[in-house]
Structure formats: structure tokens, C-alpha cells
Amino acid sequence: MSIEPKKLIEFAREQIGKSEACIRAGISRAYYSSHHYFLPLAEQFPSVKAVDNHLSHREIIHRLEAWNVDPSSPLINLKPQARTAAQKLRILRSLRVEADYELDADLDDATLKEAIERSEELKKKYHQLRIALEQSAAPATTG
């Protein structure tokens, strides 16, 4: 059995209005939805701070921030978008850490809705970056 990242965000939405445990689980799933969207994208770039070639949560963010593409490539123009995505993913990750590890923190529906909104924004950024990367890899056609 497998699951797509969009199902994780759907699960997160279903947790609105439920118990604090459900809210915390929803925040976590909102983060992991974004994490799993960006994982294959980050795998296309060289290591920045990887340990043992392990693509950690931080490494995905570092690779987006670095956006190591050929400076002569038109993809270099996407560096600000990639850095914005990294910044948003970092914030969402901190919400996930708070939900998973800081049991004294007061988390409510507003926090869950914020996590869902950030995850949805990141999904859009992911699709923009992925399409640009795919188009840059496509062979040029002659008419």
C-alpha cells in the first residue's frame, strides 16, 4: 500500500475541530505532505550538508536554498522562488516539531489551519519548480 502527499493534507484538514492530539497529528501530516512533495525535487541537486548521503529534513531545505543550477541556465532565475519555498518549509517544519515534541505547547485549530495553508502554498511552489525543471530538461525542438 502507498499514499500520495495530497492524501496527507486531506487527513490534516479532517483534523480541524477535533482533539488536541488530532490537531497535532494534522500539523505533522501537513508538514509531511510538503516534505514528500519536495523530496524528489531535492534529490536532483547536489549535496549541501548531507551526512552519509542521507537526505534529511534539513538537507532538503538546504538544497532548495542553495539551488545549485548552472549559473548560465534560465533556471537560475528560479532561485528566489526556491529560497522562498525553503523558508516556508522551514517554518512548517518548526510547527511540526512543536506539534510532535513540545507537548506543553498550546496548539489549536488556528495553528492547524496555518500549517495547512503553508502546505498548500508549498504544493503550488513545488509544482512551479518541478514544471520549470522538467521543461529545462526537455530536448529542444526544431520547427
Image (spheres, grey):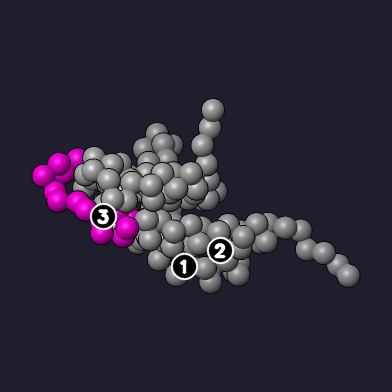
* In-image side of 48 versus 98 (left or right): right
Q: Secondary structure at mark 2?
A: helix
Tag nearer the camera, 1 or 2 = 2
Residue with the mark numbered 1? 81
- Tell me the kind of residue under disc 1: Gln
Which percent across, then down, holds residue 124? 50, 62
Residue with the mark numbered 2? 128
* In-image side of 37 versus 99 (left or right): right
What residue is drawn where x is 51% and y is 37%? 3
Front residue of this view, candidates 85 and 49: 85
Q: Splitting the image into 4 quarters, where does residue 138 fall?
A: bottom right
**Mark 2 surroundings within 10 Å by alpha-carbon count, few (fewer than 14), some (14 through 19), many (20 or more):** some
Q: Is residue 47 at least partly visible in the picture?
A: no
- Tell me the kind of residue under disc 3: Asp
Tag nearer the camera, 3 or 2 = 3
Which image quarter holds the N terminus? top right
Q: Which residues are magenta?
A: 101-115
**Disc 1 vs disc 2: Cβ atoms closer than 8 Å?**
yes
The total of numbered circles placed on residues is: 3
Which percent across, then down, holds residue 136? 66, 61
Magenta span includes 127 = no
* In-image side of 29 versus 97 (left or right): right
Front residue of this view, candidates 55 and 123: 123
Which image quarter holds the C terminus? bottom right
Residue 100 sits above or below residue 95 on the image: above
> Rounded to the nearest whole Å, what is the CA distance between mark 3 and mark 1?
28 Å
